Image (tube, rainbow, N blue to C red):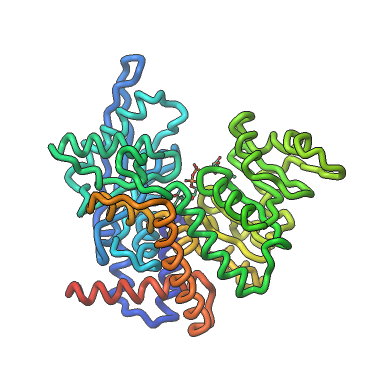
Amino acid sequence: MSLFENTLSQIEKASKLMNLSSEVKDLLSHPQRKVEASIPVKMDDGSLRIFQGFRVQHGDYAGPYKGGIRYHQQVDMSEVIALSAWMTIKCSVVGIPLGGGKGGIIVNPKDLSEGEKERLTRGYVRMMYPILGPDKDVPAPDVNTNSQIMDWFADEYSKIAGKDARGVVTGKSIEAGGSKGRNEATAQGGVYVLEEVVKDMGMAPKETTVIVQGYGNAGAIVARLLSNDGYDLRGASDSQGGIVCTHCMDPVELLSCKAEKGSVKDCGLHIKDMHDVEGVECVEVSNAELLEHECDILILAALENQITSENADRIKAKIVVELANGPITPEADEILAERGIMVVPDILANAGGVTVSYFEMLQNGSGEYWSEEEVLKKLKPIMVDSCKSVRSNMEKYKCTMREAAYISSIERIEKKIREKGIL
Ligand code: NAD
């Protein structure tokens, strides 16, 4: 099943439960625009390489298209379509006036110098310029893209536009017009939602163990935030492997160890030495083993398709949180639901990122910039209220949290579609 087929199957399930008209379902099943570009880049050695770039605009029913740009060797059109559809659905779950888009370039950025990355980014902007803009389509960072790349993006777009148009992307550095709190927003939004779920399930943070798959931007920050709230971090992984410990790990030390050694998998002994706690054991595990390890909460913060029909039976967590987009396949989702495992779906769990991106657009538009405290004060009620309305749809439709989140979202989109006279 392709990633977009996964998305369609999720839309289909919600459609049946809510008795959605076939016209709205059809609209959601077709992205409005797909663009593919060949981007020429002069490499440092003087040679020329052509990179393939994509931008998909799925739906602008609620507002301008919004969604990240991914630099990865496995990017393809089907993946970008799926991710763009999830953005339309996600923005609507949290009720922000934005539509869904997504972009990507087929590249392993680790193979490029900073100069080559900059020329690639500027080349992408030149190719996509006609379809982008602060009121049209606003990209953001995603896997392997960051604030530096967004700053180049905003600068190139503004140069072509002949004016300051920094609102064309979010996730910029603070100096270039970024929002305070954007870096933490995805993880923080997930924590606000998780707090509601944990409360409803009668669990106490201090007695709750957590494992994080994908110790990158979202994963390392969620580990830190949860540890601050008293949760017990027992394992983590990155693309090279993972570790699990018999004792609570320090997420900040783990991050600095990863920076030093290149992977969390090499940090077990290091951390054990630092704490010098008797009886503590950390063992290296494969990525597959980490997912199946004993814990209360498993946070998925890496890539798609991590829990499938092959391993869903062996997941031991009580709650699985999708900070990544699409880490659980539809077949696996059914198995987890049958086993009574609560899945907090991506379209709600990681929506804090796009919500603070929206705040960045507002700040760029008004020229007034908010403190981090103000950002979090505005983010929390959006995440908590969205979670409550999803939980109430779970009761109403007797369905999973994912199905309920789709229903909350599609109800709003349908209203917009009708208001616009498309139907
Ligand atoms: P990132 O590149 O900073 O981190 C990804 C991490 O996953 C890296 O540490 C990488 O080594 C690890 N990883 C890759 N393959 C793995 C594997 N097989 N097993 C274990 N770890 C693996 O990216 P990020 O920004 O943290 O994004 C992670 C996920 O969250 C993506 O799916 C992204 O779309 C989603 N997301 C991120 C944001 C955001 O604001 N950063 C917002 C919404 C959704």
Q: Quadrant of the C terminus?
A: bottom left
Furthest residue to the top?
Answer: 45
Q: Residue at x 38, y 55 (%)?
A: 356
Residue 89 sits above or below residue 240 on the image: below
Residue 369 sits above or below residue 413 on the image: above
**Nearest the eye: 321 or 105:** 321
Q: Residue at x 44, y 37 (%)?
A: 73
Furthest residue to the right?
Answer: 279
Confirm whether residue 10 shows in the render.
yes
Picture coordinates of residue 113, whole percent (x, y) = 41, 23
Q: Quadrant of residue 282?
A: top right
Q: Residue at x 67, y 56 (%)?
A: 210
Picture coordinates of residue 312, whole percent (x, y) = 64, 61
| Residue 5 horizontal side relative to residue 256, left or right | left
**Nearest the eye: 98 or 73:** 98
- How many marks the image carries: the answer is 0
Confirm whether residue 316 shows in the render.
no
| Residue 333 horizontal side relative to residue 286, left or right | left
Residue 421 sits above or below residue 144 on the image: below
Furthest residue to the bottom?
Answer: 396
Q: Residue at x 33, y 74 (%)?
A: 412
Q: Quadrant of residue 125?
A: top left
Picture coordinates of residue 341, whole percent (x, y) = 64, 68
